[in-house]
Amino acid sequence: MPDHEAHRLSLPVDLAVLIAFAESDIPDVDAVSAAAGARIAERLLRGESGSASVGDLGVRAAVMTVPGWTVQPLAASSQGDTTATRAVQKQLDRELGIEFTRSPAGAEQTRVSVHSFGARATAGDVVRVAVSLGAERTELLVVLYADDDGTLTGQVVTRALTMSEDLEISLLAGAALGTAHTSAVTDAVRCSLTAGRNAWRRVAKGLPVGDPVRAAIVAGLS
């Protein structure tokens, strides 16, 4: 067998089909190219491992797991007043490019802050915090915006989680927000601070009238 024929047999089947088409006089051009193209597109959408689905494409691949955290009180101050607590959980994931912080914010609320670094995210993208509450699973969205020094950041104060839940943190491209996220978007706008609400306003301005995400943002701002 000639060397070039042996090499061709070792190629993935789609590439072999394309090469065979290029070297032959097959008259049915549309049928061959369409079939090969469809198979290649299907494989790309699945990902190399075949584990990703089309619905997963808006979520950046890496996921950071943040364990539930038990708050430990500090010793009483030297003035003898009430015992103070300083409960700040911070975790950094270099692959995802996210530094995650949560801390109590009073009145049974929790402050969630995120900072993004690297090239994975841009302003208007969203950090998605998946929360497991017993058998239920909900999500908290934190929109990213550039602060005064250009760092991408986001912050919410919410009752949707406490310090004790296990969390999964992932990145969601702003353009991937859709009907399935509208309820979470409205909640996110409502629990955002001023800078975050302004960031959601900018997202809404980039969407057409009638878009469900735009309507969800407006609902949160009202």
Image (cartoon, grey):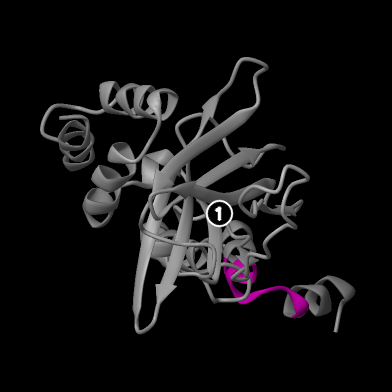
Question: Taking 203 as reference, is 211 above or below it?
Answer: below
Farthest-out residue, top: 148
- How crowded pointer 1 is (Cα within 10 Å; few <14, some 14-19, many 20+) is rated as some
**Does residue 27 appear anywhere in the picture?**
no
- Viewer-proximal residue among 222 and 83: 83
Query: Residue at the location (70% across, 48% down)?
Result: 80
Number of marks present in the image shown:
1
Screen quadrant of the C terminus: top left
- Spot occupied by residue 90 in the image (x, y as percentages of width and height): 69, 52
Callout 1: helix, strand or loop?
Answer: loop
Farthest-out residue, front: 80
Q: Is residue 183 left or right of residue 93?
A: left
Question: Taking 12 as reference, is 37 above or below it?
Answer: above
Q: Main secondary structure of the magenta part?
A: helix
Query: Residue at the location (50% across, 34% down)?
Result: 144
Query: Residue at the location (34% across, 29% down)?
Result: 200
- Viewer-proximal residue among 102 and 120: 102
- Tell me where residue 189 sits by quadrant: top left
Screen quadrant of the N terminus: bottom right
- Viewer-proximal residue among 42 and 15: 42
Q: Is residue 16 magenta?
A: yes
Farthest-out residue, left: 210
- Spot occupied by residue 173 in the image (x, y as percentages of width and height): 46, 44
Disc 1: which residue: 60
Q: Is residue 73 left or right of residue 110?
A: right
Q: For the residue marked with disc 1, what is the amino acid?
A: Arg
Residue extent of the magenta highlight: 10-17
Q: Is residue 205 left or right of residue 4?
A: left
- Viewer-proximal residue among 66 and 46: 66
**Does residue 115 appear anywhere in the picture?**
yes
Query: Residue at the location (73% across, 42% down)?
Result: 79
